[in-house]
Structures are given as structure tokens and as C-alpha cells.
Amino acid sequence: MLVVADNCDDDTAEIAKANGVEVIQRTSENQRGKGYALDFGVRYLEADPPDIVIIVDADCIVHDDALNRLAFECISLGRPIQALYLMNSPGNDGLKTKVAEFAWVVKNWVRPLGFLRLNLPCQLMGTGMAFPWLLLKEADLSSGHIVEDMKLGIDFARLSKAPHFCPDALVTSTFPINAEGVKSQRTRWEHGHLGMIVKEGPALLRESLVKANLEQLFMTLDMCVPPLAMLIILIFAMSLLGAVLALFNHQLYPWLYVWSLLVTMAISVILAWLKYGRNILSISHLIYIPFYVLSKIPLYVKFVVKRQVEWVRSRRD
């Protein structure tokens, strides 16, 4: 076990050393971000490299036999493996965080599981990730990209070594208690995701088609699906626009088509809740989802007027 204490101002290194764990420390005012920390750790391992490297964030809990499952799948397939990574709402937290927990389940469990059933790859999720050493040592890690995990997964797909999902390996974490930490974390995730769609999505799609790289194509298409709240906003906005156009040109088909998307989205959310979300939200709480979606509008407006482009560590308490 190797702990990378990166730009830490707490007792991480001392606590890890006291428990007999190997620790390396990195401090840099200019190069901040998880990618730099990962690169620092990988470069350290080069002196005596392992066959498999499993990366877990320090705020996560690794359950049951997760490490063995990840290592076994990684060796068997010879490609990156992603564990099932879930975020839990802390204690008696508010309904908004409960809805966020359910949205996380849809993104990190339901969708990757569907891709697995179709024998398709999945996105990397930042923690609970296993890599063959020969692949990881050549990866472009040293960047300040705010969604370094998503970028890394796409990079491997370009090499026809896209990650695969392992739902039998469970890793969990908890949403920050600190309100500022929650806001910072969500802004980094969603601005980073949207930035990847806008900046790199079209080029990645074109490249995957030219090279006939199906792994890259499906991962890019999945990446280009915006965050759930924004997807609902976009479909609803299109339905309103379709209704306005129908009034002027008397063509109902475009309006009905967009509304069919809205109905399909609603059915999908309900089915996901029935199978995976009833322990998180009660049926009465589902009524809050539209209000949760509306509360995300300022975050998306900020993406347009003042996008977050630098990696910022979230305060957790």
C-alpha cells in the first residue's frame, strides 16, 4: 500500500506512517490536481513495479472482496477495471442530497451495468480503478484536468483498451457535510464533464469513426450525454420550443417527438428508482426531482459565464 499525500495541510501522512503504511509527499503551488498526484505515485513505483495498480481515494471505503475482484478482472482482461463506486448522503442530510445520491446511482451503477450487459466499456469514476502496470506507466497522468478520470478512460479507449465495469467490487464514499465542499465538488464534476463534451466530444467522435474504433465511439457517445439534471432541462426546453413552433407552422410531429423523449426520460427514471432507488428516496420524494433539476440552473449558467477550469479540492467538513 502506497499513500500519496498531495498538497496536504492535515495529518494524512503522519497517520498513515503511524499505521505502518508507505507514504510519499508532494507539494506544488503550481501543479495542483489529482492527475499530478497519480503521476507522482506511478513514477515512484517504477523502481519496483507491481503487475496491477489499484487506485482508491483516501475518503473511500473498500468493501468485502473488492480488491481481489478488481485484480482478478484486471489480470483476466488485460485492461482497466472500474469498481462500482457509490456516494452516500451523510446522516440526516437534506432531501437535495438524497436526490443527488439517487442521480449518482443512475450514473455510476444503472448506466454502466447496462453497458456491461451489452459487453460495452464504461467510464472511469476516479476511485476503485485497477490498471495493468504496462498500461498505466505509459498513461498521460500529469495534468490539471478537473475530470482526469473521464479523460483517462477515453485515452485508454483510443488504444482499444477501454475500461470494463465490475459491479461485484464495491467502493463507497460520503457526500461532503460542508455546504461549500458540496458546491465545489458538484461544480468541478459537472463543469468538467460539460467541458469535455464541448471541447473534445466532436473531435473524439470523428476520430472514432475514422478509425472504426467501436470502444472509443461508445465511450464518447456515453460521455456526450450531459449530467442527468441538464439532460432533463434540455429536453423540457426543446419540448417548449416544439410547442411554440407547432402553433406557428401547425406541424405537430416535432413537438410530439420531443415530448416522447420527455416521457421516455420520465419512465426511465421511474424504472431506475423502482429497481435501485427505493432505499434512497420514498415515492413522495420523487416529486422533489423537478425542483432539484431547477436548482441546478445557476450551476449551468455559471458554466457559460464563468466556467471552472482549475482543479480545486473540496472541503469535506
Image (spheres, rainbow, N blue to C red):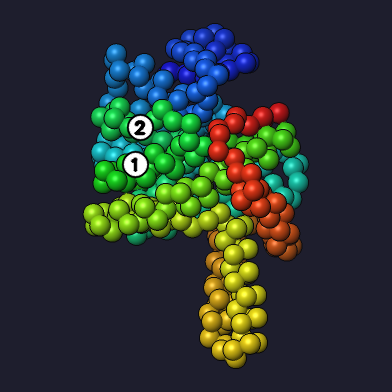
Tell me if I can see residue 120 in this picture.
no
Given the image, on which type of amino acid does mark 2 rest?
A: Asp
Q: CA distance from mark 1 to mark 2?
A: 8 Å
Mark 2, Cα crowd under 10 Å, few <14 / some 14-19 / many 20+, is some
Left or right: residue 245 versus residue 217 is right
| Label 2 SS | loop
Q: Rate crowding at label 1 as few (under 14), some (14 to 19) or many (20 or more) other CA atoms within 10 Å.
A: some
First reached walking from the N terminus: tag 1 or tag 2: 2
Q: Specify the label residue 155 is tagged with.
A: 1
- Image location of residue 50, percent across then percent down: 30, 22
Local secondary structure at mark 1: helix
Which residue occupies 26% across, 46% down? 160
Task: Say if 310 sits above or below 221 in the image.
Answer: above
Report if residue 190 is visible in the image.
yes
Label 1 with label 2: CB-CB less than 8 Å: yes
Q: Residue 259 placed where, x, y %?
A: 58, 77
Where 249 sits versus 269, above or below?
below
The quadrant where residue 78 appears:
top left
| Horizontal and vertical percent position of residue 76 | 25, 39
Q: Quadrant of residue 163?
A: top left
Near-viewer residue (107 or 234): 234
The circle on residue 140 is: 2
Q: Quadrant of the N terminus?
A: top left
Residue at x 54% of width, y 82% of height: 254
Number of numbered discs visible in the structure rendering: 2
